[in-house]
Amino acid sequence: MRKVMLAVVLCLVMVSLAFAGSLKTYQVTGPVLEIKDDVIVVEKGKEKWEVARDKATKVTGDLKVGAKVTIHYQMKATEIDVKAVKKK
């Protein structure tokens, strides 16, 4: 019985680890241009990058305008609308 329970727990751990790492992580580095409760704006080259954030976003260090930061983020689709292809 112990071996069966151990096998079940091991399987659950492996499945949860597989799903936890399914989203690829990206990063952007640059000076902070603007900080709001739900967004941070960073300059990368000549482009402004707006990255959403919430209370769960981990911040280490003194986050302020002008500070150089590296933001780690993930891209995830929230909605997909498929358009019909027009025939010629």
Image: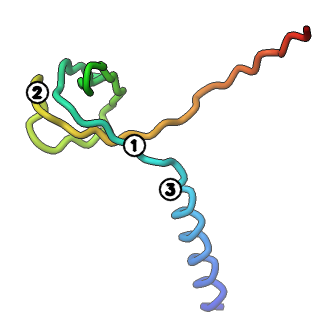
Q: Quadrant of residue 34?
A: top left
Task: Work out which residue is located at the far right of the displayed protein and give it.
Answer: 88
Please say if 24 is above or below 28: below
Instruction: Provide the residue designation for mark 3.
Output: 20
Crowd band around label 3 with a 10 angstrom C-alpha radius: few (<14), some (14–19), many (20+):
few
For this rendering, which residue is in front, 82 or 9? Answer: 82
- Report how far apart the C-alphas of labels 3 and 1 lie in the structure: 15 Å
Return the x and y of residue 55 as percentages of the image width and height.
30, 34
Q: Residue at x 51, y 48 (%)?
A: 23
Which mark is first along the chain, 2 or 1? Answer: 1
Disc 2 marks a residue whose amino acid type is Lys
Q: CA distance from mark 2 to mark 3?
A: 31 Å
x, y (%) of residue 25? 42, 47
Q: Secondary structure at mark 2?
A: loop
Q: Is 73 on the left or on the right of 75, as rendered?
A: left
**Which coloring applies here?**
rainbow
Residue beneath disc 1: 26
